[in-house]
């Protein structure tokens, strides 16, 4: 064989290798889809342990995760993998993580989503809001839009939206995430890694049918478009020499060559987004001016007016649309300002009230996931900085949301919300930790050499990528569905609430022991719901003193998920609800009127409640 | 820069045609009173794409930017229209959909019929 022929063979082999790798990736992706489908079909969510849904998933699910991650890493390594293959893998990942409850549970999950369906139902029926019903009604944008779509869609209940909302909204986040990556000049590989990161680091569980999930989409669209069309230019010239490194074109990827009229159109779209955010959520409108202001001050954003408009709109809506809320809650708004320690501990202690080893493990996974996002983002930033580009805008977008902790405990949820808002920019920046090259940087010549040592290194890199990727997906499922035992809605609970709504009269009370119930999704103003907030009635005295005497006649609903909720979140001893139910039964004033599976409904009347228990 | 320089004519026409079909189908379902999942999917798709598509058609050469502008603008317009209806006490979602359809249709019609086709028709 001549040397020319050998070279020709080598060249042909080089051409064939990506095609062969792609074929392997396609087969593995198909296998992952089939295995995953089978695994989901076989799973019984009722077997979820203290660590959540992950304990109910059979080994087939983990095989599917391994296959999918391997296929994704193979496709990325091929460098010429078709976009449809990577998109299909990403779609499988979204459904395989965020669509899990929709596929395995019989009914939509999570009590807050049911309440939000109730707000939507109120607007659907009345075409108006009642801010006195709940503070969230003062920012009705999300609920009114959902009610409008519900009417046009001809649906009788907003619960139709609840089941698949997390899948749809997570998929929607990928569009601005992709644009943000491009605005940084990320390579194709970095962009797909970032999108994969957005999906597999989204453990917070705030993407249920909620205003914050929707407001995050608007926020991401806004910053992605603003940084793409109006990026800061020539910042380095205005800075002293030592700081110029931090200003060097880090956030300036391929910029838009738009004509002035198109730029005006984009500016109008940005103002529309600011307006929609202002009326849709309590926290985001106040985060937005800070983020836009920081981007403007650091020279990353050319349109200075946007931060000012965002501040004006947030205050204007608070003064006009949300006045009913702040008139009575000024102390609630400002009491937490500056109390960083209190706000952090409100978030951590409340979230970390573990009662068993598996649950403690799950909570540790959550903290590790939150830390991983920030660590990987920081490494990505530093790797790019070493190459002479400082992505200050992404760094601000990742870390600024944590300033919310300074302002508000927000029911102990500020840390969760901050992590949720840091997710997309953090994942985009984190992709540079793995693939730091920019689109326009040539691949180093050394990477193309074929020494045995280098091949071994590449294989080790491949193995690490597969193990880390699969570990991240499993960790995400663990952290995200760690509360499955009380967040999933059983058929008994679903039927019990439907029975109650079918038999309750206007003005009746619907009482339970904690807020963890799939209720309030209709008739918000028609019935009297107790408890209305975070309290829990852990014993007979608390229930009879606080809830029943104030309730008139009505129904007491008791479900197994309430027992799990009390044990996991409030640290109550196992069996506390059975004792309470026995004690309530012993009074003789509660009639069991419905019982199915783990859900019981009792009818009571205020007239006899005053003598209950001989108090 | 490169992505802004791609030819966009055909994509514009197809997008505009798809928008007209979606609008007609969604409105048709409402007028005919057809229920079920198809109507729901059409309604969700309508409100998440149609109100902002006239903005997006300007940037169609840049797919990533177009998608974000269409989704962002559509969501924002839907939210703002619904809030205005709630605040003013004029709650007519079906009328709102009809107004959005009427306001956007001329843009889609102009984009769906290529400029050279309009010129040829004028000459004939």
Image (cartoon, coloured by chain):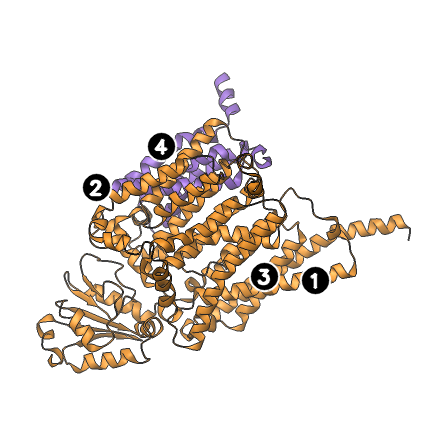
Chain colours: A orange, B purple
Instruction: Give the labeled residue for mark 1.
Output: A459
- Closer to the N terminus: mark 3 or mark 1? 3
For label 3, the SS is helix
Which residue shows up at 59% across the image and 54% down it? A433
Q: For the residue carrying disc 2, how many other residues have a C-alpha within 10 Å: few (<14), some (14-19), or many (20+)?
A: few
Quote the CA–CA distance across marks 3 and 2: 52 Å
Label 2 or label 1, whichever lies nearer to me, is: 1
Res A265 seen here: yes
A146 left or right of B17 in image: left
For label 2, the SS is loop
Quote the CA–CA distance across marks 2 and 4: 22 Å
Q: Chain of mark 4?
A: B
Instruction: Give the labeled residue for mark 2.
Output: B89
Q: For the residue carrying disc 4, how many other residues have a C-alpha within 10 Å: few (<14), some (14-19), or many (20+)?
A: few
Residue toward you, B21 or B9:
B9
Name the disc covering residue A69, or none.
3
Instruction: Give the labeled residue for mark 4.
Output: B103
């Amino acid at each position: 064989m001549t040397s020319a022929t050998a070279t020709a063979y080598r060249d042909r082999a080089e051409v064939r290798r990506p095609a062969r790798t792609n074929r392997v990736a396609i087969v593995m992706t198909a296998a992952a889809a089939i295995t995953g489908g089978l695994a989901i079909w076989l799973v019984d969510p009722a077997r979820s342990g203290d660590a959540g849904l992950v304990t109910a998933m059979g080994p087939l699910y983990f095989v599917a995760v391994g296959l999918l991650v391997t296929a994704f890493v193979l496709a990325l390594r091929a460098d010429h993998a078709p976009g449809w293959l990577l998109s299909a893998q990403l779609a499988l990942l979204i459904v395989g993580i965020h669509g899990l409850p929709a596929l395995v549970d019989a009914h939509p999950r999570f009590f807050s989503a049911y309440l939000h369906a109730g707000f939507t139902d109120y607007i659907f029926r009345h075409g108006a809001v009642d801010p006195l019903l709940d503070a969230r009604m003062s920012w009705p944008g999300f609920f009114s839009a959902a009610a409008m779509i519900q009417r046009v869609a001809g649906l009788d209940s907003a619960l139709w939206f609840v089941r698949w909302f997390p899948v749809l909204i997570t998929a929607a986040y990928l569009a601005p995430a992709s644009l943000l990556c491009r605005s940084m000049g990320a390579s194709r590989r970095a962009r797909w890694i970032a999108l994969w990161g957005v999906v597999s680091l989204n453990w917070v569980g705030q993407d249920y049918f909620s205003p914050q999930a929707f407001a995050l989409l608007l926020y991401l669209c806004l910053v992605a478009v603003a940084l793409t069309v109006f990026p800061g230019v020539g910042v380095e010239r205005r800075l002293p020499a030592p700081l110029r490194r931090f200003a060097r074109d880090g956030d300036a990827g391929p910029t838009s060559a738009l004509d002035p009229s198109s730029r005006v159109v984009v500016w109008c779209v940005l103002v529309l987004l600011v307006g929609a955010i202002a009326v849709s959520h309590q926290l985001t409108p106040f985060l937005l001016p800070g983020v836009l202001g920081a981007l403007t001050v650091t020279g990353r954003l050319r349109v200075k007016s946007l931060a000012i408009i965002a501040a004006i709109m947030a205050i204007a809506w608070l003064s006009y649309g949300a006045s009913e809320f702040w008139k009575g809650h000024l102390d609630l708004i400002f009491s937490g300002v500056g109390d960083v320690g209190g706000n952090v501990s409100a978030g951590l202690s409340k979230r970390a009230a573990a009662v068993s080893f598996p649950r403690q493990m799950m909570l540790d996974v959550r903290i590790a996931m939150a830390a991983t996002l920030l660590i990987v983002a920081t490494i990505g930033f530093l790797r790019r900085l070493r190459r002479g580009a400082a992505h200050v805008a992404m760094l601000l977008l990742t870390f600024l949301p944590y300033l919310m902790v300074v302002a508000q405990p927000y029911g102990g949820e500020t840390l969760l919300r901050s992590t949720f808002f840091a997710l997309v920019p953090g994942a985009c920046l984190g992709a540079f930790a793995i693939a730091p090259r920019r689109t326009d940087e040539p691949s180093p010549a050394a990477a193309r050499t074929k020494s045995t040592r280098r091949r071994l290194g590449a294989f080790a890199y491949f193995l690490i990528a597969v193990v880390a990727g699969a570990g991240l997906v499993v960790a995400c499922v663990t952290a995200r569905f760690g509360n499955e035992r009380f967040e999933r809605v059983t058929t008994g609970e679903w039927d019990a609430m439907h029975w109650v709504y079918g038999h309750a009269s206007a003005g009746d009370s619907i009482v339970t022991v904690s807020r963890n119930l799939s209720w309030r999704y209709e008739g918000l103003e028609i019935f009297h719901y107790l408890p209305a907030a975070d309290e829990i009635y852990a014993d007979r005295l608390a229930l009879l003193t606080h809830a029943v005497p104030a309730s008139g006649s009505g129904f007491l609903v008791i479900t197994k998920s309430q027992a799990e909720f009390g044990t996991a979140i409030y640290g109550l001893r196992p069996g506390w609800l059975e004792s309470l139910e026995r004690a309530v039964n012993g009074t003789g004033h509660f009639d069991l009127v419905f019982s199915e599976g783990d859900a019981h409904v009792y009818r009571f009347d205020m007239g006899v409640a005053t003598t209950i228990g001989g108090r | 820069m490169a992505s802004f320089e791609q030819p966009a004519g055909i994509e514009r026409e197809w997008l505009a045609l798809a928008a007209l079909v979606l609008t007609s189908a969604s409105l048709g379902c409402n007028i005919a009173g057809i229920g079920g999942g198809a109507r729901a999917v059409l309604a969700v798709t309508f409100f998440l794409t149609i109100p902002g598509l006239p903005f997006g058609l300007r940037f169609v050469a840049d797919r990533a930017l177009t998608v974000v502008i269409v989704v962002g603008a559509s969501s924002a317009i839907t939210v703002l229209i619904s809030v205005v209806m709630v605040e003013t006490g004029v709650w007519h979602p079906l009328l709102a959909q009809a107004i959005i359809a009427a306001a956007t249709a001329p843009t889609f019609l102009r984009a769906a019929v290529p400029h050279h086709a309009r010129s040829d028709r004028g000459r004939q």
